[in-house]
Each structure stands twice: as structure tokens, then as C-alpha cells.
Image (cartoon, rainbow, N blue to C red):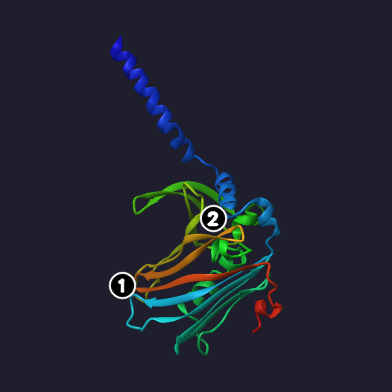
Amino acid sequence: MKIRQITLSGMIFLLSVFAPLAQAQKLKPEEIIAKHLDSITTADKRALIKSIIAVGEVKVEYISQKNQPASGRIVIASEGQKMFYGMSLNASDYAQERIVFDGNKTSVGFVRAGARSVLGNFIQSNNSLVSQGLLAGALTSSWALLAAADRGAKISSGTKKIDGKEYYTLNFSPKKGGDIDINMYFDQQTFRHVRTEYSRTSSSSIGRTIDDSARQNESRIKVTEEFSDFKDFMGVSFPNKYKLHYLVSGGSTTEISWTCNLSEFAINQAIDAGTFDVDK
């Protein structure tokens, strides 16, 4: 009888410990989104935010190439659903990056005559990442999850481990978003958005002969955004570190990273209308 009592009490203890964990793993998408938005600031303050500007230093590193690293400034400015994402760099072959959404149309600038950067080409081919408010996450007033229900996206939730740590996840499929797979990661304690992964696999092309076709490789692209070092600015939590990582593998590998240290923020500061001019 005594052994049975110990076993029963042990079971009750285990249930009390693991029941909350089990519940945590079953959060619905709307629950994760609500908790995440509250991690940014209160609903009242979010409703007052009309524009956001984030400015800082950026370093570009060519991991798979011998190019010298480049450095410069990054500006991410947004007003409502409009967004400007620009860099000014000290490299002659990559002097700038300019991605603009005016609320209707996305424009990706050339880095030199007739050529875009690999990041620019990726955005040009997947412009829903800008029009749907995904690029740069909660650093913009157009952040997709601020009005997820209005965007017509399909969203499912789950959990996943990265480097031994488990995160809540949202799989986000934008309306008319193409064939790209989008997964967002959220810290399970704070519900801050810490990562977004964009991935797509392109089937190998068909060669002129059977042997040519056999030599074709499947192309895999993965672009990752990471957000960390969250700090309070005027009652709003912003990531002060933002990293974008681009990787294409298959026949050849291209790997580049953009590491940004954001040091200046502005909320509801007037932004010149020309900032969002897609015809510049």
C-alpha cells in the first residue's frame, strides 16, 4: 500500500510538471501571434505607431567567395504598409541596395548597370516577402503579423529545435506567395520573433540528352533573418542586432551574410514621400 501511494504521488507530480509543457506545445497560431504582439508593446501603443525608422551599421561578408567584406549603413523605414530597405556600402561592385514598396508595387534597384545583387534578385523573384510585410519583421510598421487575419495568409503552428533550444513556429503561406516555404520562430518565454527562414527547392533542368539531364543538379535556396539583442525604445521592444544570411546550394554554392547593428530608432517621425517612390 505504501509503495502504491508513492507511485501515485509521483505520477501526480509528473503530470503537474509536464502538463504545462504539453499545453505550451499546442498553442494555436492566433495565440502565438497575440503573445508575440504583446512582446513588442501593448495593443494601445501598437495602434498609435504609424511609422518606424531603424538605422545602423551593416557588414557584408562573402562566405563562399573571395570578395573583400563591405561595410556601410542600413536604413529600414516604413509608414503604414509602405517600406524602404536600403544600404550604402563602400564597395565599387556593391555600392548600394534599394528595395521599396509603395503600398502597391515593389521596386528592387540595380547595384550596377542592368544587374541586381543576389539579395535583390531573390526579392525581385519573391516580392510578396515585401508586399506582405515579411522582410525585416517587427522592425517595420508593415510587419505581417500586425494584421495577419487581414492578409489572407494560411498560418499553422508548431515547435522546432535549433541548436538544442526549442521555439514556437509559424508556417506562413502568403496569399499568392508562390512556392517559397516560410517559417517564423518565436522564443518560448518572451514570444519575441527571433528568426524567419525562407526556403525553396528548384527542380533540376532537363538537358539535351539523358546524360546531360543526369548531370543537372537540384538548386536549393535558403534565406534566413535573425533578430536579437532586444532593447526598449519609447516603450517598444526592437531588436538591435539583425542578420540576414543567403545560401544557394546545388551545382554551385553562393553564401553571403549581412550583419547589422541598429543603433538609432524613430517612431512616428515624418518620412518624405519620395522615400517610397518606386520609380527612382
Label 1: element kind: helix
Name the residue: 58% across, 66% down.
128
Nearest the eye: 2 or 277: 2
Label 2: element kind: strand
Q: Earlier in the sequence, mark 1 or mark 2?
A: 2
Q: Locate residue 46, reporting x and y percent.
A: 66, 56
Spatial CA span between label 1 and label 2: 34 Å
Task: Give the position of the N terminus as an image quadrant.
Answer: top left
Nearest the eye: 46 or 244: 46
Report the mark closest to the observer, 1 or 2.
Answer: 2
Q: Which mark is residue 138?
A: none
Q: Which mark is residue 215?
A: 1
* Badge 2 density bin: few <14, some 14–19, many ≥20, Cα 10 Å: many
* Badge 1 density bin: few <14, some 14–19, many ≥20, Cα 10 Å: few
Q: Locate residue 190, reporting x and y percent.
A: 50, 49
251 relative position to 129: left or right: left
Q: Locate residue 175, reporting x and y percent.
A: 61, 59
133 relative position to 196: left or right: right
Q: Is there any visible trace of residue 183 in the rendered image?
A: no
Residue type at tag 2: Phe
Name the residue: 54% across, 66% down.
136
Q: Locate residue 197, reporting x and y percent.
A: 46, 61
Q: How many numbered marks, from 0 up?
A: 2
Give the residue pinned by disc 2. 172
Q: Is there any visible trace of residue 44 in the rendered image?
A: yes
233 in relation to 156, above or below: below
Name the residue: 65% across, 52% down.
149
Residue type at tag 1: Arg
Name the residue: 45% across, 68% down.
244
Task: Give the position of the C terminus as an image quadrant.
Answer: bottom right
